[in-house]
Amino acid sequence: MDGPGLLQCSGQAASGGLAAARFGTRAGWAGGTPVAAVNTTNSGRIALPPVTDFLVIGGGVIGLTLALECRRRHPDCRVTLIEKESGWGRHATGRSSGVLHAGFYYTADSLKARFTRRGNQRWTEYCRERGLLLHCCGKLVVARSRAELDAMEELVRRARRSGVALEELSAADARKIEPRVRTFERALFSPTTAVVNPRQIVEALVADARLAGVELVGATAYRGRRGAQIETTAGPISAGYVINAAGLYADTVARDFGFSERYRILPFKGLYLHSAAGAPPLRTNIYPVPRLDNPFLGVHLTVTPAGGSKVGPTAIPAFWREHYRGGTNFRWREFAEIVGREGVLFLRNDSGFRGLALRELPKYWKPHLLRLAAGLATGIERAHYPSWGPAGIRAQLFDVRRRTLEMDFCLEGDDRSFHVLNAVSPAFTCAIPFSEFVLQEIGRRVS
């Protein structure tokens, strides 16, 4: 291996980092004293080191948990994380719904099913022990017509196979949990679904990482690879092993290492309408029965940790990777590539893309989005949900050979680099056990 090797680490880890952070085991994640809020900008800027054993690209929840797991497994190794923004979790992580999913949507043989139930438990413990916001409100899944009852039965079967608690209710029993709920004959209740504040968790992870001796270098973007040397906007760094958790740009980084040949990121914009002060509260999250052949869960009602609620999200095809608002972050090359690919998908209707686009585009119109939400609960009025929240972008992986949207996590790597190509929802929920799995996979490749 070029550069400092994984098995011959540089030994420049911060003194006592792992013992102090107590990261990794169940007791380690949930134990320790509560972490005070920290400034998530790169204050007291850390210079990019010339050499590192592990280089993690991407400062969202996946990148942060991967960097911490690197330090836990390799305490004598130098671990550096670079993030192109000046702060942490500015993209998918900080803009996520904050829902800790239970894990009953996914087939039992999927990585999502494998990690969601465990991730839910780990984050719940982490938040309780750290004193972070945690709203254990559960989730109702409702049917809008008789045609959805078969899909509801399939969710029950998936829950049983994955060992996830899921209660079958009559419509009357569902109204005892949430008096405003609408459902056809039956409903499902997930008691372990919870809601957290993603930015608060990012702050805690940043504090953990610094305490553990991870070098967090913000405002530093990946620019390319030259052998074992990685080019960044802050200069070059020689890396023994590279872990790519770059989210919307994970596929472009991976191609520099010979991976992601058959995959490209397609961005989808997620928007929520947020409730006004004084809007009627909800006791629990309310979701429709999803289309099981589609990676999106549909418009739902989400309770916030502060006691409000929001309607969404959309899954509107975006025209460039960071197409959050107006023309911000516009790049001609991205625009041409992504719109061209979306146009072909629309014409061919691969993966039902045409129907998806036609369903999603009207959701830019508030009355339409609220009408969909009104099918889930009574008392949904426009005055209660007056404003859009910050947009999020889902980095959805597309297989250009099979012309399908990837439904599960997608990972590629070798003895020099590892690439997290598809880490869409419920990646936030899965992050802790997922990071452990990734480091196990890396260990298999370098042993």
Image: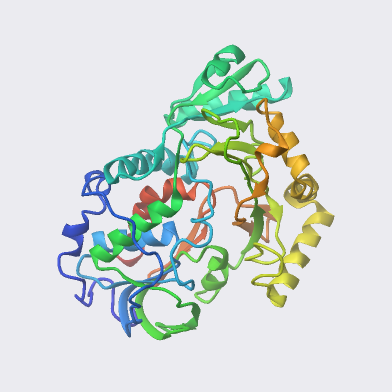
| Quadrant the N terminus occupies | bottom left
Residue 128 location in percent, x, y?
Answer: 31, 40
**Could you say where residue 224 lies in the image, as x and y percent from the top left?**
50, 81
Vertical placement of residue 362 versus 380, above or below: below
Residue 273 in the image: state x and y as whole percent: 65, 45
Seen as rendered, the residue at the extreme right is 347
| Residue located 43% across and 84% down the image | 234
Q: Is residue 348 left or right of residue 298?
A: right
Q: How is the image coloured?
A: rainbow
Q: Quadrant of residue 213?
A: bottom left
Residue 396 figure quarter: bottom right
Residue 131 vertical position relative to residue 405 in the rendered view, above or below: above
**Nearest the camera: 265 or 18?**
18
Q: Is residue 431 left or right of residue 70?
A: right
Query: Which of these two is toward me, 224 or 445?
Result: 224
- Whether residue 194 appears in this view of the structure is yes
* Residue at the spot 62% in from the left edge and 56% down from the top edge: 391
The number of discs equals: 0
Q: Image point 44% across, 26% down: which residue?
A: 165
- In the image, residue 81 lies at what x, y percent? 37, 70
Q: Is residue 65 visible?
A: no
Of the 4 image quadrants, the one containing the C terminus is bottom left
Q: Name which residue lies at 33% across and 78% down.
A: 46
Q: Is residue 14 left or right of residue 227?
A: left
Considering only vertical position in the picture, is 320 above or below 229?
Answer: above
Look at the picture and state if 196 lies above or below 16: above
Most extreme residue toward the front is: 278
